[in-house]
Image (cartoon, helix red, strand yellow):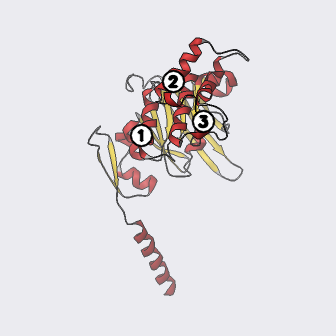
Amino acid sequence: MSFKQDIDHPIVKVSNLSWSTSTNQILSDISFQVPLGSFTGMLGPNGAGKSTLLRCLYRYITPESGQVLLNGQDISSLSNYEFARKVAVVLQHTPQHFDLSVFDVVALGLIPHKSMFSNNTQADLSLINTAIEQVGLSDKTECDFETLSGGEKQRVMIARAIVQRPQLLLMDEPTSHLDVKYQIQIMELAKSLGITVIASFHDINLASALCDQLLVLKQGRLHISGTPKNVITEETLSTVFDVCAKVSAHPQHHTPHVTYFYGYIDKISNSSNDKNESEGD
């Protein structure tokens, strides 16, 4: 499915979305569209509002203003059952104290599609086993979920999402505590599913390599959006992340690749010395 072909057919449309706590404005007037079948990444420094925006999208919190449409329907109008059939979520932290096997955790993805107390059919069992195989954990099917590594747990949660058969997969920094190999593996796996994905990233280079479009947040506002080539620039890195960097083409896939410059501790020390000297004068 081509990103360019589907740019005029958004599955998600966010309009003028805002949200605040009793003391702070967290999101302000955010609008964007997500094309059907695309992989969209969210970038921004800590506190920019990425997780809060995703929470609005998966209805953990309700925007104080604005609208989120899924296939033209306001998500607030959908029942919990309808929403669960259309949207799956993989979070940064995997569930704790799951006294279930890998098979049973993955099988939870069937809940939105089953009536209460109904038994799994042969087709259901095949779907579960195929999803487990797809994430490379066939040898762990009967293992206790709690005994798995962090990367394996995230793969189980993606298998559960596969079984859920959503139209939209939302991922909130699911790789931030994982080794580099599993960061790449899990995000490549999500992209390979052929469904619409919106994921927040800490790693700018990983987002650049895998995403069709990027949303860059700064202080709760959408600072810039577009393709990685248009978004990941030295100016954006300086303005949004306050870093000095060089952007070049990656040797493998030719998307923007960021090389950072160092010496920030020297700047902090110099700034502190300058301040002390000024106060001494």
Residue positioned most to the left: 251
Measured in 3D between alpha carbons, the distance from the residue under mark 1 to the one under mark 2, in whole angstroms, is: 19 Å
Which residue is rendered at x = 58% and y = 29% of the image?
A: 142
**Which dot marks residue 97?**
none
- Residue holding disc 1: 184
Residue 64 image position (x, y, % from top left): 68, 39
Residue at which label 3 appears: 145
> How crowded is the residue under tag 2: few (<14 C-alpha within 10 Å), some, or many (20+)?
many
- 10 Å crowding of disc 1: few (<14), some (14-19), many (20+): some
| The N terminus - image quarter | top left
Query: Which mark's residue is nearer the viewer, 1 or 3?
Result: 3
Kindly identify the residue that appears in the image at 54 percent across and 16 percent down.
126
Q: Nearer the viewer, residue 226 or 246?
A: 246
- Looking at the image, is mark 1 or mark 3 earlier in the sequence? 3
Horizontal side of residue 218 vs 82, given as left or right:
left
Q: Where on the picture, by quarter, is residue 245?
A: bottom left
Residue 101 to residue 71: above or below: below
How many numbered discs, if any? 3
* Residue shown at 58% from the left, 40% from the top: 147
Q: Please say if 112 is above or below 157.
A: above
Q: Position of residue 233 (x, y in %)?
A: 35, 48
Q: CA distance from mark 2 to mark 3?
A: 16 Å
Residue occupied by mark 2: 131
Q: Would you say residue 186 is visible in this rendering?
A: yes
Quick one: SS at disc 1? helix
List x then y, in percent, for residue 236.
Answer: 40, 50
Amino acid tagged 2: Ala
Q: Quadrant of residue 164?
A: top right
Element type at mark 2:
helix
Between disc 2 and disc 3, whose residue precedes? 2
